[in-house]
Amino acid sequence: MPHLQKMPFNPLKDITPVARLSIHSIVICVSGKSPINSMKDLIAYANKGNKITAAVSTAAGSVDLVMRAISKRANIPITTVPFAGGAESTTALAGGHLTIGGGHPSEVMPHLKAGRFKAIGVALDKRDPVIPKVPTLKEQGIDVATWGSVKGVAVPNGTPPEIIEYIASTLKKISEDPAYKKAMASIYQPIDYLNTKDWTAFLQREYKDYGDLIKELDIKI
């Protein structure tokens, strides 16, 4: 959002990162009844003159960015259709009202297991351990990789270093706890812990990556 509109705070200056907990990927899906089984199929489908509509959770959100990036870098027309959230967009795709859609594994996995969806790509720079059989977009020749939804913890500036270290080390122990791992796996949420130093560097990289992508795609709200 800071790249798209004025915010009441600067996420890189006004808070202190503590630790990253997880990354939720964007999974590209089609209806289980669709003839499309891969990104190559999707491109071929578009090149035959078929119209491609994409269900996205919100305008200028993470799924919308992925779909627009695919459209530009694969050189195929994709019309994104924003909804009020992930539940609504996945329901619309399940109903066969759009060609493709996207969402986090926790949103699409029930549909994948029931055969209502097929997953044809993941928009990370590596495969998502939750759905390891689904290739990344880059593996399929489309130069698109975003960070999806990242979960982490921060504290107000001025928090004593020993408190930051205590929270970070406690979160690391939690990330390694078998019960926590089991709970996260049950909601298809991969654990991807980073300590304070690495989380801070990642935030800066992620912020720049999304800013560059938004500028390239000329997205405005």
Image: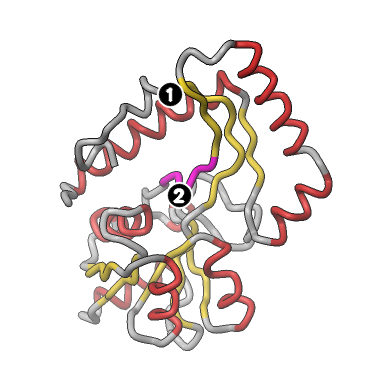
Quadrant of the rendered image containing residue 210 = top left
Task: Identify the coloring.
Answer: secondary structure
Residue shown at 45% from the left, 58% from the top: 140
User: In the image, which disc is placed on residue 47?
Assistant: none
> Which percent across, then down, holds residue 65?
31, 53
Residue labelled with disc 2:
148
Q: Kindly identify the residue that appears in the image at 56 percent across and 62 percent down.
A: 105
Examine the image and state in which quarter residue 95 appears.
bottom left
Q: Are marks 1 and 2 in contact (CB under 8 Å)?
A: no
Which residue does the image show at 77% across and 32% down from the upper left?
173
- Identity, as a three-letter code, of the amino acid under mark 2: Gly
Sequence-first tag of 1 and 2: 1
Q: Answer left or right for 215 relative to 100.
A: left
Instruction: Locate residue 47, reporting x and y percent.
Output: 24, 74
Asked if residue 4 lies left or right of residue 55, the reply is: left
Image location (x, y in percent) of residue 156 = 47, 22
Which stretch appears magenta? Answer: 146-151
User: Is the N terminus in the top left, top right, bottom left or bottom right quadrant?
Assistant: top left
Front one among 56 and 215: 56
User: Circle 1 sits on which residue?
Assistant: 15
Crowding near the residue tagged with mark 2, few <14, some 14–19, many ≥20 C-alpha atoms within 10 Å: many
Q: Residue at x 52, y 29 (%)?
A: 154
Relative to the observer, which residue lies in front, 124 or 185? 185
